[in-house]
Protein backbone atom coordinates (compact mmCIF):
# COMPACT_ATOMS: atom_id res chain seq x y z
CA UNK A 1 0.00 0.00 0.00
CA UNK A 2 1.17 3.57 -0.71
CA UNK A 3 2.76 5.55 2.13
CA UNK A 4 1.90 9.11 0.99
CA UNK A 5 -1.12 10.45 2.87
CA UNK A 6 -2.75 11.83 -0.29
CA UNK A 7 -2.57 8.53 -2.13
CA UNK A 8 -5.18 7.24 0.33
CA UNK A 9 -6.83 10.42 1.57
CA UNK A 10 -9.87 8.78 3.16
CA UNK A 11 -7.84 6.33 5.21
CA UNK A 12 -5.26 9.00 6.09
CA UNK A 13 -7.85 11.55 7.24
CA UNK A 14 -10.20 9.29 9.15
CA UNK A 15 -7.56 7.25 10.96
CA UNK A 16 -5.85 10.52 11.88
CA UNK A 17 -7.15 13.99 12.70
CA UNK A 18 -10.77 13.14 11.85
CA UNK A 19 -10.96 9.71 13.46
CA UNK A 20 -13.81 10.94 15.66
CA UNK A 21 -15.99 11.26 12.54
CA UNK A 22 -15.49 7.63 11.48
CA UNK A 23 -17.07 4.28 12.24
CA UNK A 24 -14.51 1.48 12.54
CA UNK A 25 -15.04 -2.20 11.92
CA UNK A 26 -11.95 -4.37 12.16
CA UNK A 27 -9.63 -3.37 9.30
CA UNK A 28 -12.02 -0.90 7.66
CA UNK A 29 -13.74 2.39 8.32
CA UNK A 30 -16.37 4.67 6.90
CA UNK A 31 -17.36 8.23 7.65
CA UNK A 32 -20.43 8.36 9.85
CA UNK A 33 -23.38 8.67 7.42
CA UNK A 34 -24.42 12.13 8.62
CA UNK A 35 -21.00 13.45 7.57
CA UNK A 36 -20.44 11.62 4.29
CA UNK A 37 -20.10 8.36 2.41
CA UNK A 38 -16.34 7.88 2.25
CA UNK A 39 -15.00 4.47 3.19
CA UNK A 40 -11.63 2.71 3.15
CA UNK A 41 -9.87 -0.50 4.17
CA UNK A 42 -6.45 -0.87 5.75
CA UNK A 43 -5.28 -3.02 2.84
CA UNK A 44 -6.60 -5.40 0.19
CA UNK A 45 -6.61 -8.52 2.35
CA UNK A 46 -9.81 -10.54 2.33
CA UNK A 47 -10.29 -9.68 6.01
CA UNK A 48 -10.08 -5.94 5.36
CA UNK A 49 -12.32 -6.08 2.29
CA UNK A 50 -14.88 -8.17 4.18
CA UNK A 51 -14.95 -5.57 6.95
CA UNK A 52 -15.39 -2.82 4.36
CA UNK A 53 -18.23 -4.69 2.70
CA UNK A 54 -19.95 -5.17 6.05
CA UNK A 55 -19.82 -1.41 6.69
CA UNK A 56 -21.50 -0.73 3.33
CA UNK A 57 -24.18 -3.33 4.01
CA UNK A 58 -24.84 -1.97 7.50
CA UNK A 59 -24.57 1.79 6.92
CA UNK A 60 -25.38 2.36 3.27
CA UNK A 61 -23.62 3.55 0.12
CA UNK A 62 -19.87 4.03 0.43
CA UNK A 63 -17.31 5.90 -1.63
CA UNK A 64 -13.66 4.90 -2.13
CA UNK A 65 -10.90 7.30 -3.23
CA UNK A 66 -7.90 5.19 -4.18
CA UNK A 67 -5.12 4.96 -6.76
CA UNK A 68 -6.90 2.12 -8.56
CA UNK A 69 -10.32 0.53 -8.78
CA UNK A 70 -10.89 -1.88 -5.88
CA UNK A 71 -10.90 -5.66 -6.12
CA UNK A 72 -14.27 -7.34 -5.56
CA UNK A 73 -15.60 -6.43 -2.12
CA UNK A 74 -17.81 -9.04 -0.45
CA UNK A 75 -21.47 -8.10 -0.16
CA UNK A 76 -21.26 -5.07 -2.45
CA UNK A 77 -21.65 -4.01 -6.04
CA UNK A 78 -20.06 -1.11 -7.91
CA UNK A 79 -22.60 1.64 -8.65
CA UNK A 80 -20.19 3.93 -10.47
CA UNK A 81 -16.50 4.55 -11.03
CA UNK A 82 -14.87 7.79 -12.16
CA UNK A 83 -11.33 8.98 -12.75
CA UNK A 84 -10.49 12.13 -10.81
CA UNK A 85 -7.51 14.45 -10.82
CA UNK A 86 -6.10 15.18 -7.38
CA UNK A 87 -4.61 18.69 -7.27
CA UNK A 88 -2.42 20.36 -4.65
CA UNK A 89 -1.69 24.03 -3.92
CA UNK A 90 1.50 25.10 -2.14
CA UNK A 91 0.83 28.76 -3.03
CA UNK A 92 -2.32 30.65 -3.98
CA UNK A 93 -3.12 33.42 -6.43
CA UNK A 94 -3.13 36.95 -4.95
CA UNK A 95 -6.46 38.10 -3.56
CA UNK A 96 -8.62 40.47 -5.62
CA UNK A 97 -11.30 42.88 -4.50
CA UNK A 98 -14.92 41.83 -4.85
CA UNK A 99 -18.23 43.57 -4.27
CA UNK A 100 -19.65 40.84 -2.05
CA UNK A 101 -18.98 39.77 1.52
CA UNK A 102 -17.69 36.28 2.33
CA UNK A 103 -19.49 35.17 5.48
CA UNK A 104 -18.63 32.33 7.90
CA UNK A 105 -21.12 29.46 7.80
CA UNK A 106 -21.98 27.06 10.59
CA UNK A 107 -24.67 24.99 12.22
CA UNK A 108 -27.25 27.77 11.94
CA UNK A 109 -26.80 27.66 8.16
CA UNK A 110 -26.79 23.87 7.86
CA UNK A 111 -30.23 23.46 6.25
CA UNK A 112 -29.48 26.07 3.60
CA UNK A 113 -26.04 24.58 2.93
CA UNK A 114 -27.52 21.13 2.41
CA UNK A 115 -30.23 22.54 0.13
CA UNK A 116 -27.68 24.41 -2.00
CA UNK A 117 -25.44 21.34 -2.27
CA UNK A 118 -28.40 19.10 -3.10
CA UNK A 119 -29.41 21.49 -5.89
CA UNK A 120 -25.94 22.00 -7.39
CA UNK A 121 -24.28 18.61 -6.63
CA UNK A 122 -20.68 19.69 -5.94
CA UNK A 123 -19.97 16.22 -4.54
CA UNK A 124 -21.17 14.14 -1.60
CA UNK A 125 -22.76 16.49 0.95
CA UNK A 126 -24.87 15.45 3.91
CA UNK A 127 -26.54 16.98 6.96
CA UNK A 128 -23.30 17.35 8.95
CA UNK A 129 -20.69 17.55 6.17
CA UNK A 130 -20.19 21.20 7.05
CA UNK A 131 -18.79 20.11 10.42
CA UNK A 132 -15.77 18.44 8.79
CA UNK A 133 -14.12 21.85 8.40
CA UNK A 134 -14.70 25.59 8.04
CA UNK A 135 -17.11 26.93 5.40
CA UNK A 136 -17.74 30.39 4.01
CA UNK A 137 -20.48 31.65 1.74
CA UNK A 138 -22.17 34.51 -0.05
CA UNK A 139 -25.70 35.72 0.61
CA UNK A 140 -27.83 37.81 -1.73
CA UNK A 141 -30.94 39.35 -0.19
CA UNK A 142 -30.56 36.91 2.69
CA UNK A 143 -30.39 33.81 0.50
CA UNK A 144 -27.31 31.58 0.55
CA UNK A 145 -26.22 31.51 -3.11
CA UNK A 146 -22.63 30.25 -2.97
CA UNK A 147 -20.28 28.45 -0.60
CA UNK A 148 -16.97 26.64 -0.27
CA UNK A 149 -15.21 24.89 2.58
CA UNK A 150 -13.08 22.05 3.87
CA UNK A 151 -13.57 18.29 4.00
CA UNK A 152 -10.81 15.68 4.46
CA UNK A 153 -7.82 16.60 6.63
CA UNK A 154 -4.91 14.15 6.29
CA UNK A 155 -1.85 15.16 8.30
CA UNK A 156 -0.31 18.30 6.79
CA UNK A 157 -3.10 18.84 4.26
CA UNK A 158 -6.71 20.03 4.12
CA UNK A 159 -9.07 19.38 1.23
CA UNK A 160 -11.00 22.29 -0.28
CA UNK A 161 -14.48 21.07 -1.14
CA UNK A 162 -18.18 21.88 -1.37
CA UNK A 163 -17.65 24.67 -3.90
CA UNK A 164 -21.02 25.50 -5.42
CA UNK A 165 -23.11 28.39 -6.72
CA UNK A 166 -26.88 28.60 -7.19
CA UNK A 167 -27.75 28.42 -10.92
CA UNK A 168 -29.42 31.84 -10.76
CA UNK A 169 -26.24 33.49 -9.48
CA UNK A 170 -23.48 32.05 -11.63
CA UNK A 171 -21.02 34.11 -13.66
CA UNK A 172 -20.32 36.58 -10.84
CA UNK A 173 -17.01 35.16 -9.65
CA UNK A 174 -18.32 33.67 -6.42
CA UNK A 175 -16.78 30.21 -6.81
CA UNK A 176 -13.29 31.41 -7.69
CA UNK A 177 -13.12 34.00 -4.91
CA UNK A 178 -14.52 31.66 -2.25
CA UNK A 179 -12.17 28.85 -3.23
CA UNK A 180 -9.24 31.27 -3.25
CA UNK A 181 -10.14 32.34 0.29
CA UNK A 182 -10.54 28.77 1.57
CA UNK A 183 -7.18 27.85 0.02
CA UNK A 184 -5.42 30.88 1.48
CA UNK A 185 -6.70 30.07 4.97
CA UNK A 186 -5.44 26.48 4.70
CA UNK A 187 -2.01 27.66 3.60
CA UNK A 188 -1.92 30.26 6.38
CA UNK A 189 -2.14 27.41 8.91
CA UNK A 190 1.07 25.95 7.50
CA UNK A 191 -0.70 23.17 5.58
CA UNK A 192 -1.03 22.46 1.88
CA UNK A 193 -4.43 22.56 0.20
CA UNK A 194 -5.72 19.85 -2.09
CA UNK A 195 -8.90 19.07 -3.98
CA UNK A 196 -10.36 16.63 -6.45
CA UNK A 197 -11.91 17.25 -9.86
CA UNK A 198 -13.36 14.84 -12.37
CA UNK A 199 -10.47 14.28 -14.75
CA UNK A 200 -12.53 15.25 -17.80
CA UNK A 201 -13.77 18.55 -16.33
CA UNK A 202 -11.37 20.83 -18.18
CA UNK A 203 -13.17 24.03 -17.16
CA UNK A 204 -12.94 23.26 -13.44
CA UNK A 205 -9.31 22.16 -13.71
CA UNK A 206 -8.48 25.40 -15.52
CA UNK A 207 -10.08 27.43 -12.73
CA UNK A 208 -8.16 25.53 -10.07
CA UNK A 209 -4.89 26.01 -11.95
CA UNK A 210 -5.54 29.75 -12.15
CA UNK A 211 -5.74 29.82 -8.35
CA UNK A 212 -2.46 27.96 -7.84
CA UNK A 213 -3.43 24.28 -7.86
CA UNK A 214 -1.37 21.77 -9.82
CA UNK A 215 -2.24 18.22 -10.77
CA UNK A 216 -0.64 15.65 -8.49
CA UNK A 217 -1.99 12.34 -9.75
CA UNK A 218 -5.16 10.60 -10.84
CA UNK A 219 -7.31 8.70 -8.36
CA UNK A 220 -10.39 6.54 -8.80
CA UNK A 221 -13.66 7.47 -7.08
CA UNK A 222 -15.76 4.31 -6.70
CA UNK A 223 -19.30 4.22 -5.31
CA UNK A 224 -20.35 0.96 -3.65
CA UNK A 225 -23.77 -0.25 -2.56
CA UNK A 226 -24.98 -3.40 -0.85
CA UNK A 227 -25.48 -6.22 -3.33
Image (cartoon, rainbow, N blue to C red):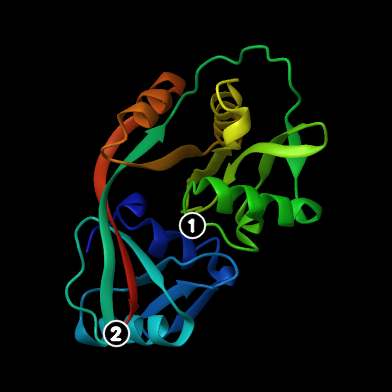
Residue 48 picture quarter: bottom left
Give the side of residue 16 with respect to residue 225, left or right: right
Closer to the N terminus: mark 2 or mark 1?
A: 1
Residue at the spot 35% in from the left edge and 37% down from the top edge: 87
| Residue lying furthest front | 168
SS class, disc 1: loop
**Which one is in front, 168 or 87?**
168
Residue at the spot 57% in from the left edge and 49% down from the top edge: 119
Which disc, if any, is residue 141? none
Q: Is residue 210 above or below residue 163?
A: above
Q: CA distance from mark 2 to mark 1?
A: 21 Å
Give the side of residue 93 with respect to residue 96, left or right: left
Residue 195 picture quarter: top left
Q: Position of residue 102 (x, y in %)?
A: 73, 29
Residue at the spot 58% in from the left edge and 69% down from the top edge: 21
Q: Position of residue 58 (x, y in %)?
A: 45, 87
Q: Quadrant of the C terminus?
A: bottom left
Kindly identify which residue carries mark 2: 227
Q: Are marks 2 and 1 in contact (CB under 8 Å)?
A: no
Kindly identify which residue carries mark 1: 124
Give the side of residue 161 with respect to residue 108, left or right: left
Q: Position of residue 88 (x, y in %)?
A: 39, 35
Q: Is residue 211 above or below residue 28?
A: above
**Which one is in front, 147 or 38?**
147
SS class, disc 2: loop
**Which one is in front, 93 or 108?**
108
Crowdedness near tag 2: few (<14), some (14–19) or many (≥20) residues, C-alpha within 10 Å: few
Give the side of residue 138 with respect to residue 7, left or right: right
Residue at the spot 50% in from the left edge and 54% down from the top edge: 152
Residue 60 picture quarter: bottom left
Crowdedness near tag 1: few (<14), some (14–19) or many (≥20) residues, C-alpha within 10 Å: some
Amino acid sequence: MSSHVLDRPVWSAFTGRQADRAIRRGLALRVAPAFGLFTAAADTSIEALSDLGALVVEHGVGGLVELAAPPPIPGTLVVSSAMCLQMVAETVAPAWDVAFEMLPLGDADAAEMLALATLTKPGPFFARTHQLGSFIGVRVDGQLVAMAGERMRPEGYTEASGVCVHPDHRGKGYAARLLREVTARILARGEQAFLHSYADNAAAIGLYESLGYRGRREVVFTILAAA
